[in-house]
């Protein structure tokens, strides 16, 4: 990624594609792109050369209807296509020959598609390019294949120690490689390397100070004494240090003509805001020229009436003046305590500087919010309680060499010690470059085998000489204990029950996101809460943290759910992080009873069969039981799950392998909430469920499930 100039703030997610659930968005976008480019073999071109960008946008709308509620340009185009049936058929069929032959006839529609639909597809997918998951031509990279689950993640010895999952590792690798370059591609800035280095030095920072240090850096402005800068950094310093170039026409004590003011103080989103800026300016001028109480009162009234707009434009989000709402100090006192230059002959310059700084601060906040969300996906930076700090700090201090990170944080490409990528052209932009390829953390950090061994030895010393296997268990045990404390504090039994009940009404989706994590989708949150409910049902006897296929942040927030290759929750360990004598799989869905037939029957059965065969092949002797959790079920779903236990079933992973007596028990989430009260009978109820699926009966009882649930509850 390249920056244009020294004042540009880097951006990991384009404005038109920015949303709260950024990791879920990236996963969805790359899945759509993979289907269009690799399955349908389409070129990433606009109409009439290809329908790829048009199709991408349509699928993005379908994937996230709750995010893309308003899409007027798309709706207008669809209306026009209804009137042009041949064009509509050609687009739907991907008939590019016809489209190119008739493009002159539909110039206006093509232009509207390019400016209102395809440009958005380019914006959304540019976020994948920025993180190296695709190249500039939107071909999925080797790194992108790992995110899609097409390529298995092979962790190095250091990565194995980190208590994070595969998706966390994928983002950790890509962010460690991420660099912002100058236009020439000679100098660079690596924001995530800077982030980890800052947290190694400062240990704990407010989120605001952390964001300012990381987000405000630029490859054009390399810091000479980085250690001093970090050690002495105070919140807001990046704004004080920012150089603002004042336009010549503002270097005058005279009042600006309204036309000049509107040109110098624009607002692209709402033109009416500029009217309020100008009214504020005129009240400033009035007080400057006539220092009377009436002029001051009029100025303060304008500020109070438009406080949100004016504070954002001229106060970097804070109050422009120190006066409280409703207060009316005398003029002399006011002028003594406020910014004197706002009421001097330098007023125009001072106001412009305030406007430029406020705009910069607003942009910094907006872009750093997205950066924080993406950094969360690594699982190694905690953002709890308004602070940023490293999770598993003792381990991170061993694994991350601060000198290496300092060198990687900013520098010149020709001075890079790794000859594999000593130029911009070999670093990013195309498939096969360093950024787009798969490298483990040891390679990214340029650790030799000797260095890696020394790090492992440091880890052993930190953990009192334990073996690596013991260290692995100790780290995960500590992580489990932290999770238990987090759940006890944030998700006690009663709150989990209340949250479960909300999922029965999809109008509660916004409330659910706000109460759990706005950055996750509701289906992701559903899996998370179902897991917590099962944890309580088990009497806290299971290790639900290890069972989740979800990707969690360092603060145990759900970020994104598992792909389609495995069950949602697979419980193999007890609360002591030790292997259990049975395996429980939970498949959770928010699909209604009718949709379950199309969307869940096959994957739930496939996951259940494959898991049972996997256990049998490994000779663990563990019993496998699947529970299908949803709001409600239709009769066919209930009885099909009962019936499949009586027939042999084939593995989808190994066609030579078969199993029988596959148990899939439907349980509604309201019933799961009630089962929490039966925690003392957890093992007994599991055994009773298994007994339900004995295949000796010849008469099928259509009410088998209802009778059992009534008996249990």
Image: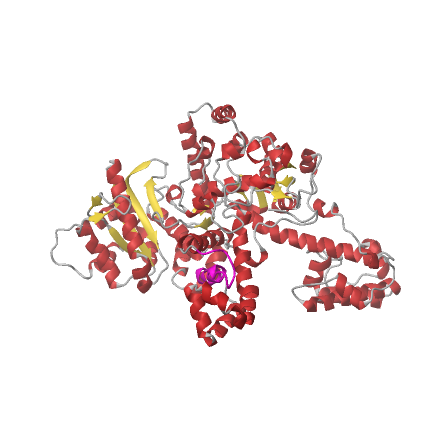
In the rendered view of the protein, which quadrant contains the C terminus? bottom left
204 up-or-down from 271: above or below: above
Query: Residue 113: x percent and y percent?
Result: 53, 66
471 up-or-down from 135: above or below: above
In the picture as drawn, the residue positioned furthest to the front comes out as: 101
Q: Is residue 215 left or right of residue 354?
A: left
In the picture as drawn, the residue positioned furthest to the bottom comes out as: 83
Res. 668 in view: no
Q: Give the color scheme: rainbow, by chain, secondary structure or one colour.
A: secondary structure
Q: Is residue 253 left or right of residue 159?
A: right
Instruction: Looking at the picture, tell me which residue is in the foreground, 655 or 194.
Output: 655
Residue 699 location, quadrant: bottom left
Residue at 46% x, 71% y: name it.
87
The span picked out in magenta is 42-66
Residue 65: within the magenta?
yes
Instruction: Looking at the picture, tell me which residue is in the foreground, 711 or 26.
Output: 26
């Amino acid at each position: 990624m390249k920056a244009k100039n020294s004042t540009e703030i880097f951006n990991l997610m384009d404005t038109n594609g920015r949303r709260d659930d950024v990791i879920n968005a990236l996963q969805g976008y790359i899945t759509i792109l993979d289907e269009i480019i690799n399955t349908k073999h389409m070129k990433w071109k606009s109409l009439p050369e290809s329908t790829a960008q048009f199709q991408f946008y349509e699928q993005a709308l379908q994937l996230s209807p709750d995010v893309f509620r308003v899409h007027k340009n798309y709706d207008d185009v669809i209306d026009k296509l209804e009137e042009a049936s041949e064009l509509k058929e050609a687009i739907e069929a991907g008939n590019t020959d016809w489209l190119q032959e008739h493009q002159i006839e539909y110039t206006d529609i093509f232009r509207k598609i390019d400016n209102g639909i395809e440009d958005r597809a380019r914006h959304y997918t540019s976020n994948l390019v920025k993180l190296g998951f695709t190249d500039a031509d939107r071909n999925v990279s080797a790194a992108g294949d790992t995110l899609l689950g097409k390529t298995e993640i092979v962790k190095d010895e250091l990565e194995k120690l980190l208590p994070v999952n595969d998706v966390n590792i994928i983002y950790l690798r890509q962010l460690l490689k991420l660099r912002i370059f100058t236009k020439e591609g000679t100098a660079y800035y690596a924001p995530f390397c800077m982030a980890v280095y800052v947290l190694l030095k400062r240990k704990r920072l407010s989120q605001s100070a952390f964001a300012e240090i990381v987000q405000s850096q630029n490859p054009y402005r390399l810091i000479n004494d980085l250690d001093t800068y970090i050690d002495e950094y105070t919140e807001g310093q990046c704004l004080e240090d920012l150089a603002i170039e004042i336009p010549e026409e503002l270097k005058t004590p005279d009042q600006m003509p309204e036309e000049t003011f509107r040109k110098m103080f624009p607002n692209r989103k709402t033109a009416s805001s500029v009217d309020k800026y100008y009214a504020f300016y005129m009240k400033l001028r009035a007080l400057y020229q006539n220092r009377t109480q009436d002029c001051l009162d009029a100025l303060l009234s304008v500020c109070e009436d438009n406080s949100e707009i004016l504070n954002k434009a001229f106060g970097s989000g804070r109050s422009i003046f120190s006066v409280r709402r409703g207060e009316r100090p005398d003029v002399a006192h006011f002028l003594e305590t406020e910014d004197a230059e706002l009421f001097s002959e330098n007023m125009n310059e001072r106001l412009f500087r305030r406007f430029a700084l406020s705009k910069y601060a607003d942009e910094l906040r907006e872009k750093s919010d997205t950066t924080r969300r993406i950094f969360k996906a690594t699982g190694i930076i905690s953002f709890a309680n308004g602070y940023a700090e490293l999770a598993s700090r003792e381990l991170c201090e061993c694994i991350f060499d601060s000198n290496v990170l300092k060198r990687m944080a900013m520098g010149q490409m020709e001075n890079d010690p790794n000859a594999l990528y000593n130029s911009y052209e070999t670093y990013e932009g195309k498939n096969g470059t360093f950024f787009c390829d798969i490298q483990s953390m040891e390679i990214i950090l340029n650790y030799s085998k000797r260095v890696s061994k020394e790090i492992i030895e440091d880890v052993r010393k930190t953990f009192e000489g334990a073996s690596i296997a013991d260290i692995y268990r100790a780290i995960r045990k500590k992580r489990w204990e932290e999770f238990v404390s987090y759940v006890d504090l944030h998700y006690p039994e009663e709150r989990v029950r209340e949250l479960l009940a909300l999922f029965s009404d999809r109008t509660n989706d916004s409330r659910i996101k706000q109460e759990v994590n706005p950055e996750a989708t509701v289906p992701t949150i559903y899996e998370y809460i179902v897991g917590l409910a099962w944890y309580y049902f088990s009497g806290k006897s299971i290790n639900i943290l290890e069972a989740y296929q979800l990707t969690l942040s360092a603060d145990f927030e759900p970020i994104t759910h598992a792909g389609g290759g495995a069950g949602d929750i697979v419980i193999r360990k007890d609360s002591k992080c030790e292997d259990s004598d049975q395996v429980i799989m939970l498949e959770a869905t928010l699909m209604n009873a009718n949709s379950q037939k199309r969307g869940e029957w096959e994957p739930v059965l496939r996951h259940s069969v494959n898991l049972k065969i996997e256990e049998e092949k490994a000779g663990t002797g563990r019993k496998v039981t699947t529970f299908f959790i949803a709001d409600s079920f239709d009769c066919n779903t209930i009885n099909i799950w009962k019936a499949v236990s009586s027939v042999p079933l084939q593995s989808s992973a190994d066609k030579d392998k078969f199993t029988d007596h596959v148990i899939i028990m439907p349980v509604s989430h309201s019933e799961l909430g009630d089962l929490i009260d039966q925690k003392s009978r957890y093992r007994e109820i599991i055994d009773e469920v298994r007994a339900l699926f004995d295949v000796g009966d010849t008469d099928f009882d259509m009410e088998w499930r209802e009778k059992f649930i009534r008996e249990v509850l």
